[in-house]
Structure formats: C-alpha cells, structure tokens
Amino acid sequence: MPFLPAAILLSASFALAQNQQPLYSTYEFNPLQHLAGIAPYFEPADPPRDPAPPQGCQVTRAAYLMRHAAINANDYDYEEYLEPFIQKLANSTVDWSKIPELSFLSTWSPPELEEEERITRTGKLEAAQLGVQISYRYPKLRLPKRVWTSSAERTTVSAQSLIRGLEIEDDQTEMVTISESKKAGANSLTPYSSCPNYSSSAGSKQSSAYVKSYTAPVLSRFRSLAPGFDWTSDDVIGMQEWCGYDTVIRGSSPFCSTKLFRPDEWLQFEYSQDIMYHYNTGYGSPVSGAIGFPWLNATLNTLASPPSNDDQDIYISFTHRELPPTVLVAMGLFNNSELTGTNNPNATMPLDRINYHRSWVSSYILPFLTNVAIEQMNCSASYGYENVTDPTFYRVLVNQSPQTLPGCFDGPLESCSAQGMKDLVRERGKMFGEYSAVCGVDYGNSTDVLSIYGRNLTGMSVGK
Ligand SMILES: *[C@@H]1O[C@H](CO)[C@@H](O)[C@H](O)[C@H]1NC(C)=O
Ligand SMILES: *[C@@H]1O[C@H](CO)[C@@H](O)[C@H](O)[C@H]1NC(C)=O
Ligand SMILES: *[C@@H]1O[C@H](CO)[C@@H](O)[C@H](O)[C@H]1NC(C)=O
Ligand SMILES: *[C@@H]1O[C@H](CO)[C@@H](O)[C@H](O)[C@H]1NC(C)=O
Ligand SMILES: *[C@@H]1O[C@H](CO)[C@@H](O)[C@H](O)[C@H]1NC(C)=O
Ligand SMILES: *[C@@H]1O[C@H](CO)[C@@H](O)[C@H](O)[C@H]1NC(C)=O
Ligand SMILES: *[C@@H]1O[C@H](CO)[C@@H](O)[C@H](O)[C@H]1NC(C)=O
Ligand SMILES: *[C@@H]1O[C@H](CO)[C@@H](O)[C@H](O)[C@H]1NC(C)=O
Ligand SMILES: *[C@@H]1O[C@H](CO)[C@@H](O)[C@H](O)[C@H]1NC(C)=O
C-alpha cells in the first residue's frame, strides 16, 4: 500500500484492527436460508450490491412481481411428506425420550393446521412490512391505486396484507383479482397453469435421484439411533420441510437444529429442490421463458408508456412460486451458464454432487414473498450520463439485490438504457417463441399477451 496517503492508511489499519478475526475458527449456519420454496422471506444479498439507486438516478416508476407470503403448508408437501411423517410418528412405539438426538420427538406435536394452504400470521405480518418498506423505498412516487393478484386465497390475502402496509388511509389502494383460469392463455398471473406443455411434476424424477443419494447416510444414522422406526427418505424430506413450516407457523422448530441435520445436509436438501425447480420452472424446462416473457413484456410496456393522470407509479402483482423463476429465465438472470461460453443448462445441475457455485439457488429466487422488481429511473444527474439523449434507464432487483441483465448494462452501475431494454425484450421474445405455440395450447381462445394493467379492471378495497 505504498501510494496511499497517511490518513487512509491510518483508517485502513483501524478498520483492520476492528475486523480482526478471532484465533479460534467460527462457523455459522442458518437452515432457514436454505429451505428453497419453504424459506421464510429473507433478503440474501445475492449479490451484496447497494439497493439504493445509482448516484444521480431517481426512480420514476417501479413494478413488482411477488410470490404470496408464508403459508401453513402446500397441499403437495403436506400429502407427500408432512402428514405421512406425522402419521408414522403417531403410530410408532419408539421411546424417543431415550434417544438424545431425537428426544424432541417425544414432546413435539404438529401445529394445528386449521386450513393447510392459508397464509400464516407471520406471512401476513411480513407482507404488510414489505408494503411499508416499498413506501419507504419510493417516497416520491404515488401510492398505487391498484394492486393485482391471482385469485387464490393465499395470493389475495397476501395482497391485502401488503396493501394495509402501503396505505396511509384505509381504502386508498384497491385489489384487482385476476382469475386463475386454465384457459386464460398468457393473460393471467398464473400462465403456467394454462400452458399444457408445462408439467407441475417436471423435475421430480431428477430431484429424487439426488434425494436418494443424499439421504442414504442420514437414514443409516437414523436407523442406528432408532432401529424400531421404518425410516425412509420421505421421512427425511418431511422432517426438513417441517423445519420451514413449523417455523412460519410457530416461530421456531426443533427440526431446524444443525445437530439433527448437519449444515451440509441442509445444503443437500436445498440442492435437491434446486434441481427440481431447474427442470420445473428454470433453465432446464423448454417452456419457462415463454411462460415468463408476457409479464416482462407487458410490465416494461406499461413502465415505458407516457404517464397520464390516471396512471400509477408502482405496479405490484401477486402470484405463486412458479411465475417469478420463469420471469427470471425470460430476463436471463441466474443462468448457471452465463459467461461460460457454452450453453448446456442441464449439465450445470449434476445429479450426483452439488454445484456449489451455481447461480440457480431456489432459496434466493423463490422464498415466501419473493419479489422481482423492475425500476425505471431518470439518470439525467448521473456523472457520465448527463448528455445522453434519453436519460431513462431500467434495473432489476431480486429481493432488493440489483441484478445485471446479460446483454444490457450500458447505464449507470450496469443498469439498462431504454433503447437497450427495448432491443433486449424484442430479442428475448424471439428467442422463446410465442406462448400459445410453445405451450401447445389446446383451447381456441388463447392469447400471447398479458393485458391486466391496460384493462380498466375495478378492484375492491380491503379495509383494515
Ligand atoms: C398407522 O396406523 C393405522 C392404524 O393401524 C394404519 O391404518 C395406518 O396405515 C398407519 N399409518 C402409517 C403411516 O403407518
Ligand atoms: C377463454 O374462455 C374461457 C372460458 O370461457 C375463459 O375463462 C378464458 O378467460 C378465455 N381466455 C381468454 C384468453 O380470453
Ligand atoms: C434439459 O432436460 C429437460 C428434461 O429432460 C429437457 O426437456 C430439456 O430439453 C433439456 N435441456 C436441454 C437444453 O437439453
Ligand atoms: C444462458 O446462458 C448461455 C451462455 O451465455 C446462453 O447461451 C443461453 O442463451 C442463456 N439462456 C437463456 C434462457 O437466456
Ligand atoms: C429527468 O429529470 C430531469 C431533471 O429533473 C428533467 O429535466 C427531465 O425532464 C427528466 N426526464 C425524463 C425523461 O423524465
Ligand atoms: C456534457 O455536456 C456539457 C455541456 O456541453 C459538457 O461540458 C460536458 O463535458 C459533457 N459531459 C460529458 C460526460 O460528455
Ligand atoms: C408443446 O406441445 C405441442 C403439442 O402438444 C408439441 O408439438 C410441441 O413440441 C411442444 N413444445 C415444446 C417446447 O415442448
Ligand atoms: C410485446 O409487446 C409489444 C408491444 O406492446 C406487443 O406488440 C407484442 O405483441 C407483445 N408480445 C408479447 C408476446 O406479449
Ligand atoms: C377507469 O375507470 C374509472 C371508473 O369507471 C374511470 O374514472 C377512469 O377514467 C378509467 N381509466 C381509464 C384509464 O380508462
């Protein structure tokens, strides 16, 4: 550091002293941040970039796509893993209290799930909190007049909670409900369910190959601890899933212990889920891009349209876990192959070992309440961009972390110019093909365009 002025040197050595590592090694691990679709909402800082707009840029409009908040349990998880484990536990004659590692099973009882798929109290609170945070992020923008949501109870309840956090007075923001019709073509917030070529079970075959290998040593450990219990890999998945659901229902769970499952075993659970999502709604599915593209296209068209009195500044839409990852594919984000010079997506998710350096980490992409934002910015005061003909730039944030779009980073801090964005969207649209054709739509009245923002739908106010 010979060229640094003395003052900087001084403060650098001060900082060093402050951050000095202890001599003993430390290791911390939080399973809740590795639970894929069951991860409670968190902002993983992936990458750890500053969420504030670049210097000299002001956000002029923003759009958010959000997954619903935490639910008690998803039907599929409940029927396949959670309930069978509870039943086995109830039937078992093992005296758990005698097995230190598993003694919690003698006192643990499952939460009362009055209705499985309902938003938990934690979920409502987190959605409201995100509403408040969004209002803090954009103090100069008008509060939205409308928030859009698909029609399931868990998405509408999440939207209502977020609205309550956003509003200053009651009834300032209406909720517009979009039907989850199986024949809506691309014109809904659930376009995967009207896409016959999308399969909700895609990825389970590949995922179970990996599950089989990672659970084998766990099962062998559990069998030696409790030989009287007929352990299967479904029990391991069930217990790991209980960690997430138990936590969002009751605030904590004994299943999250890193003594029960070691940190690496949580990473293995996460990877098994990442494999599933890769084939289900990620780069391993031939239909992901076409499913996610209409939201991207319609949202950018809306942000770019000239403002009028009736318009709003912030567009928020609620959906389920499937749509955000397809939108990320449509944008080209979290692509394991990016910058590798090759494109063999399935080879980036091997089934016999973890790719630790993958970008596709479902805990970061689709936790409860995950949100993908597109911000439109006026960067006319940004150094180096003062004289551009159009000072409008866009950037994408996933759970608050700014992302760089492959193919468009000509603006301040790798944001994307208005023209660059137009070109990118056109190119990506061509690359994926039209929704109805790619989906093999078998009903007559499909559409390739999402038009929920344009249709002057009337919503309902949500009250307190
Ligand atoms: C539990 O026991 C009941 C009654 O004997 C039986 O019907 C059921 O199949 C058992 N469940 C499991 C998961 O073993
Ligand atoms: C097609 O018709 C069905 C049934 O009437 C309706 O639910 C659906 O919204 C329509 N699709 C489009 C794209 O208008
Ligand atoms: C990846 O695997 C899926 C499932 O087998 C397949 O549909 C898809 O075409 C594969 N992708 C590529 C690029 O080979
Ligand atoms: C992923 O990245 C590779 C390598 O840059 C690229 O060829 C491929 O088109 C990308 N996939 C998508 C869907 O954008
Ligand atoms: C950007 O902001 C500048 C300074 O406030 C303003 O003069 C200009 O009209 C704005 N441009 C756009 C496209 O909003
Ligand atoms: C922008 O234009 C002003 C006035 O013509 C000029 O002084 C300045 O150097 C230009 N800035 C850049 C980054 O080109
Ligand atoms: C979608 O389905 C149609 C008709 O079933 C089929 O011909 C087509 O190959 C499929 N496309 C993709 C990308 O899987
Ligand atoms: C994308 O938006 C353009 C401009 O509104 C529109 O012409 C086109 O049909 C849209 N394409 C899709 C697939 O949504
Ligand atoms: C939407 O409908 C409302 C109430 O009917 C009307 O006041 C408003 O002007 C309409 N807005 C647009 C953009 O058509």
Image: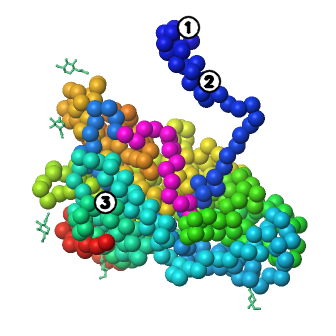
Identity of the residue drawn at 12% across and 54% down? 308
Way the structure is coloured? rainbow
Identity of the residue drawn at 79% across and 69% down? 103
Please tell me whether mark 2 or mark 3 is closer to you in this view: 2
In the picture, measured across the screen, residue 46 lies left or right of residue 407, that is right
Label 3 CB sits under 8 Å from any ligand 9 atom: no
Image-quadrant location for residue 76: bottom right
- In the image, 423 versus 23, the foreground residue is 23
- In the image, 365 versus 381, the foreground residue is 381
In the rendered image, residue 82, in percent from the top left (x then y), is placed at 65, 75
Residue 393 vertical placement versus 82 (above, below): above
In the rendered image, residue 206, in percent from the top left (x then y), is placed at 65, 62
> Of the residues shown, which amino acid type is indicated by label 3?
Leu
Q: Magenta span: helix, strand or loop, mainly?
A: loop
Neighbours of disc 3 within 10 Å: few (<14), some (14-19), many (20+): many
Q: Which residue is labeled 1 in the image?
A: 2
Q: What is the total number of numbered labels drawn onto the structure image? A: 3
- Give the residues drawn in magenta, as a range: 38-52
Identity of the residue drawn at 21% across and 56% down? 312
Neighbours of disc 2 within 10 Å: few (<14), some (14-19), many (20+): few
Q: Which residue is labeled 2 in the image?
A: 17
Residue 131 vertical placement versus 109 (above, below): above
Image-quadrant location for residue 440: bottom left
